[in-house]
């Protein structure tokens, strides 16, 4: 079974959201700055994951890596060896020491070293008293490209937060059908579509629905966005993402919020609810069952992120 190492970074305020995303993607919290797992996740998916190393060799010292990489035969292909070294990780290395290790390992690889445009990039990293070497992939901050869009609301989820919420709601993409029934201007939709997720959107208000369509088209994606209430949804979905309305254009009353949550329980199996205030009692009343949670902070806002399961799923399993 192949092992992967993922480096990640987040601010102190983002730590709870980051760890909740890690639990969704990998089944557990990440250690400081690094996650080791047999799960293969594209680093572009997460706003927090920076790099992925597909482990080929490991040993107690980097010299053992030097010996093992002699088995790598690339022929006439070009390659580069990159030592991942954050000061937060185990071994403290100077710049000179890092270059020395990269050079020694590179000299053992049968291939043509190329620093600028290599065909293959390998990484070596010290972690918990051992050294690991493998194929390297750097994540692209796709969500950054989505910050500049035609329509924007100050209270909308940030693209970074929206991307994490999508991963919490939909950790496995293949064959999944998802819905955002209170989509607003479509930040969640854009992030989901950029990951190749099959998702549809709707909003009870006409202006947000129009804005969502504009934003989606602006980035070259396609997605059905319907004007209408969640009560009108008749299809069933694997996942739903509910960012409860609470902006100046539309603040849902407690009765409306309960209706939204109750219908979310009806139309989807796995539901992520985002709320600007504690709603545990309302969640229980709607029939949803909380499976995980965190508080996510944005300047001026603290949001509850609740991962829920439909009570109908539990009924089927009993």
Image (tube, rainbow, N blue to C red):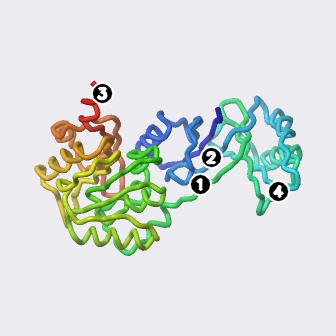
Of mark 4 and mark 3, the one earlier in the sequence is: 4
**Mark pair 4, 1: CA separation:** 21 Å
Q: Quadrant of the C terminus?
A: top left
Return the residue at label 3. Answer: 317
Q: Quadrant of the N terminus?
A: top right
User: Which quadrant would residue 162 be assigned to in this image?
Assistant: bottom left
**Mark pair 1, 2: CA separation:** 8 Å
Q: In the picture provided, is 283 more to the left or to the right than 300?
A: left
Q: Is residue 153 above or below residue 280?
A: below
Q: Are marks 4 and 1 in contact (CB under 8 Å)?
A: no
Mark 3 or 2, closer to the camera: 3
Q: Are marks 1 and 2 in contact (CB under 8 Å)?
A: yes
User: Which quadrant would residue 298 be assigned to in this image?
Assistant: bottom left
- Residue sitting nearer the eye, 198 or 121: 198
Q: Are marks 4 and 3 in contact (CB under 8 Å)?
A: no
Q: Are marks 2 and 4 in contact (CB under 8 Å)?
A: no
Percent across and percent down for residue 216 are 40, 68
Return the residue at label 2. Answer: 52
Return the residue at label 1. Answer: 139
Of mark 4 and mark 1, the one earlier in the sequence is: 4
């Amino acid at each position: 079974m192949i092992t992967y190492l993922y480096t990640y970074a987040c601010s102190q305020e983002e730590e709870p959201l980051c760890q909740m995303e890690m639990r969704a993607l990998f089944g557990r919290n990440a250690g400081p700055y690094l996650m080791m797992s047999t799960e293969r996740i594209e680093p572009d998916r997460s706003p927090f994951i920076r790099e992925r190393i597909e482990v080929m060799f490991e040993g107690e010292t980097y010299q053992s890596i030097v010996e093992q990489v002699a088995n790598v035969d690339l022929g006439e292909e070009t390659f580069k060896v990159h030592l991942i070294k954050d000061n937060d990780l185990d071994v403290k290395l100077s710049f000179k020491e890092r270059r020395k290790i990269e050079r020694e390992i590179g000299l053992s690889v049968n291939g043509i070293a190329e620093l600028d445009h290599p065909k293959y990039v390998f990484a070596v990293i010290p972690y918990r008293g051992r050294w690991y070497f493998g194929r390297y992939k750097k994540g692209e901050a796709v969500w950054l490209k989505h910050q500049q869009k035609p329509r924007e609301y100050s209270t909308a989820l940030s693209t970074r937060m929206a991307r994490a919420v999508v991963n919490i709601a939909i950790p496995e993409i293949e064959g999944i059908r998802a819905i955002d029934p209170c989509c607003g201007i479509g930040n969640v939709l854009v992030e989901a579509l950029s990951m190749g997720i099959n998702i549809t959107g709707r909003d009870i208000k006409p202006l947000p629905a129009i804005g969502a369509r504009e934003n989606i088209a602006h980035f070259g994606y396609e997605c059905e966005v319907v004007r209408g209430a969640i009560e009108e949804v008749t299809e069933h979905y694997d996942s739903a993402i509910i960012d409860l309305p609470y902006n100046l254009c539309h603040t849902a009353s407690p009765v409306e919020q309960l209706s939204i949550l109750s219908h979310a329980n009806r139309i989807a199996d796995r539901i992520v609810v985002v709320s600007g205030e504690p709603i545990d009692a309302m969640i229980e009343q709607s029939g949803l069952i909380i499976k995980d949670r965190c508080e996510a902070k944005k300047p001026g806002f603290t949001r509850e992120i609740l991962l829920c399961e439909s009570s109908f799923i539990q009924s089927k399993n009993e």
